[in-house]
Image: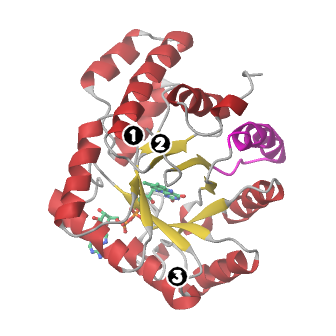
Amino acid sequence: MTSPTHTFSFELFPPKSVEGLDKLATQIERLKAVGPEYVSVTYGAGGSTRERTFQTVALLRAQGIDTAPHLSCVGSSRAELCEILHRYREEGIHRIVALRGDLPSGMGAGGAGDLRYANELVTLIRAETGGHFHIEVAAYPEFHPQAPSAERDLQSFKRKVEAGADGAITQYFYNADAYFAFLESCARLGVDVPVVPGVMPITNFSQLARFSDACGAEIPRWVRKRLEGYGDDIEAIRAFGHEVVLRMCRRLLEGGAPGIHFYTMNQADPSLRLWKELGLPGAERIAPPG
Ligand code: FAD
């Protein structure tokens, strides 16, 4: 089901406190055991997590883990973005996830920054740093919530690839058919970069429902109904959620997905459990949950 060309990676977000960073170090130890291709670190739009993203990137790098910082352009000036790019290049970072980001509601157009869309950020990265970075961009098999149409969103995705993206990571989804249909549309448009599915383990229904409403990811009705029915029974939610996501990951890999990017939400074990049962490389090194 997998080959050395597959890419298996994790995503973390920067913790808010020093204690949070200490806790994250323990999770990183666990993730490191399987030898992910890279670990990515999110970046708050407008630079809201700037220093904390740097700290988290440094923590990963100190562990010898290939790290891909996210960089979102909305709310930032060209000069700020270039400063960060040069900093990462000097630190020897080779991967970056280039995004537009979302400004908090209420922040008017005045806070929008110099660049409007992620394709402009990809263009800036290539203009400033040439081929130094391996650039990933976001892809939306169920389409971006602000896109006026599916076709326009596909064209936006194509623009990012034409600007120089090497690959893409998708928004999470629970419907493998949406992913395969997206790949078919990409092929039709002549977009042939690897599109790695982003997979979100299911561990908490109310949080997942909130995120999904915001980012336009659909929780299939039968999954939502079952999760709702478990109420506060966290164990039942996790057991059912694990089976749903595991089955989808198997379908994705059997159908030709070039890897999996796990949205860990800073919790190693739900992603590692999937990793283990999928038999991904390094699964034998996973220690039992602490
Ligand atoms: P874009 O590709 O710019 O698209 C945004 C919208 O504009 C789409 O509707 C698109 O169709 C449209 N569009 C694009 N280009 C044009 C154009 N030239 N003309 C007209 N319309 C256009 N957010 C963060 O703040 N920090 C993160 O670290 C982060 N990490 C993420 C990682 C992944 C893998 C994913 C999938 C999302 C992540 N996000 C993150 C969320 C992301 O910032 C939001 O989904 C945001 O709303 C869109 O970002 P984008 O890069 O996809 O934008």
Query: Measured from the top left, where is residue 57 in percent x and y?
Result: 72, 60
Mark 2: few/some/many CA within 10 Å (<14, 14-19, 20+): some
Circle 3 residue: 125
* Residue numbers of the magenta segment: 13-34
Circle 2 residue: 2
SS category of the residue bearing label 3: helix
Q: Amino acid at mark 1?
A: Leu
Kindly indicate whether the residue at mark 2 contacts the one at mark 3 (C-beta within 8 angstroms): no
Asked whether, in this view, residue 175 is left or right of residue 22, the answer is left
Query: Measured from the top left, where is residue 228 in percent x and y?
Result: 38, 16
| Camera-side residue of 288 and 3 | 3
Circle 1 residue: 253
Kindly indicate whether the residue at mark 1 contacts the one at mark 2 (C-beta within 8 angstroms): yes
| Camera-side residue of 41 and 77 | 41
| Camera-side residue of 73 and 2 | 2
Marks 2/1: CA–CA distance: 7 Å
- Cβ at disc 3 under 8 Å from ligand 1: no
Q: Amino acid at mark 2?
A: Thr
Asked whether, in this view, residue 10 is left or right of residue 55, the answer is left
Q: Quadrant of the N terminus?
A: top left
Q: Main secondary structure of the magenta part?
A: helix
